Amino acid sequence: MVSTEAMRLFVKILEEEEPGWYSRASNSVSEPVIDLQMNHNSNVEPIIENRNSFAETKIISAENGGLMETQDKDVVSEGLGSIVVYDKWISPPVIGQRPKARYQHGAAVVQDKMYIYGGNHNGRYLNDLHVLDLRSWTWSKVEAKVVPKSVESPSPVNIAPCAGHSLIPWENKLLSIAGHTKVPPETIQGKAFDLQTGTWSVLNTYGKAPVSRAGQSVTLVGTTLVIFGGQDAKRTLLNDLHILNLETMTWNEIDAVGAPPSPRADHAAAIHAERYLLVFGGGSHATCFNDLHVFDLQAMEWSRPTQQGEIPTPRAGHASVTVGENWFIVGGGDNKSGALETVVLNMSTLAWSVVASVEGLVPLASEWFNCVRNAAMEIELLHADQQGMVERCK
């Protein structure tokens, strides 16, 4: 048995026999897991719970029906603008109710807030939603409601705990796409969290939906989501390509030409010039990859261009974010060690370079965390998988 597959099986067995291994390994916080609480009263405004021991967070109503947070000025940090260190990862002073340690969660930034949803904790899938205020570095837990299936069927929809999904901001919503659940569905399921009403609802789609999966990439391109690869509930690796039109909620499978990437999961994908889908790395049951593939969304054709510069080592489970023409890749691993370097690809020249590096056993040199960007500040943010930790590099 190859070492990569042996490690995957080892972790699976470890989670079954020693459910607390991850907490002990990461020196997790001692608070119990707080699952997403469902309030079926549609007249109740969404509540953000905060257990900040430094100052009390006040919740006030905004004119658009949403919520605003205020804190005593003497304890509010200066947020992202106060950090002036460049090309180096640092841990800002985060306060508030930190999320439980997890991996394979989803993360997304909307304006000056970063949301995380779901994930895997000690082999248990989660469905809680948390938000980090990027101005004050304060964590809060979002108390959400669910929308009934219909007027005729007032029973609430089932927001099943999941891991390995993708969280995508779209208009005034967060879209959770795919992911593994305890009882896997036959096809990809999607749900939406309305940021104004604080409610979850199920996405009703049309057309032939792809088989359910986790470890896929989901990339927002205009008004569509482009889904590639992943691994289904039977651990079959995939390399199919699908598009979900967000205006019509219709699925389409792409009949592409050219040689696609080999079946894989836990890769990274990004869009360049609203036309080219780039896919880097990922893993199979036997190995990890450092190949780069490009899909032309106009010609519907795969290609494998020549990479330039300091090509990253093979890795899976890495995180990525784009800033202009630059595509930053953080973390990941190859079963032997974690990737210590933060690398960047110029998507126009396809040239790699190293931006930063870390040392030792740190969350950045690990798998299954998330990297997101504050659009206004052109800053990458990392939500690591231990103790609600946040690190950032400017």
Image: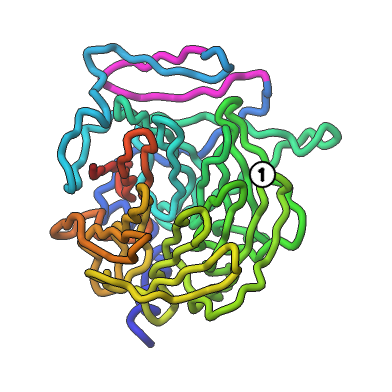
Residue at left 43%, top 41%? 33
Note whether 330 is above or below 73 in the view shown: below
Residue at left 67%, top 23%? 41
Q: Residue 323: horizontal and vertical position, in percent?
A: 35, 47
Residue at left 32%, top 26%? 135
What amino acid is at disc 1?
A: Asn
| Residue that extends furthest to the right in the rendered view of this protein | 152
Name the residue that disc number 1 marks: 158
Q: Quadrant of residue 72?
A: top left
SS at mark 1 in the image: loop
Residue 216 appears in the figure: yes
Q: Quadrant of residue 311?
A: bottom left
Q: Residue 321: horizontal and vertical position, in percent?
A: 37, 51
Residue at left 31%, top 61%? 345
Note whether 195 is above or below 388 in the view shown: above
- Magenta stretch: dominant secondary structure: loop
Nearer to the camera, 98 or 90:
90
Residue 146 vs residue 170: left or right?
A: right
Residues shaded magenta: 43-61
Note whether 65 is above or below 254 in the view shown: above
Q: How is the image coloured?
A: rainbow
On the rendered image, what quadrant is the N terminus found in? bottom left
Residue 127 inside the magenta-drawn segment: no
Residue 238 vs residue 34: left or right?
A: right
Q: Residue 216: horizontal and vertical position, in percent?
A: 51, 62
Nearer to the camera, 320 or 36:
320
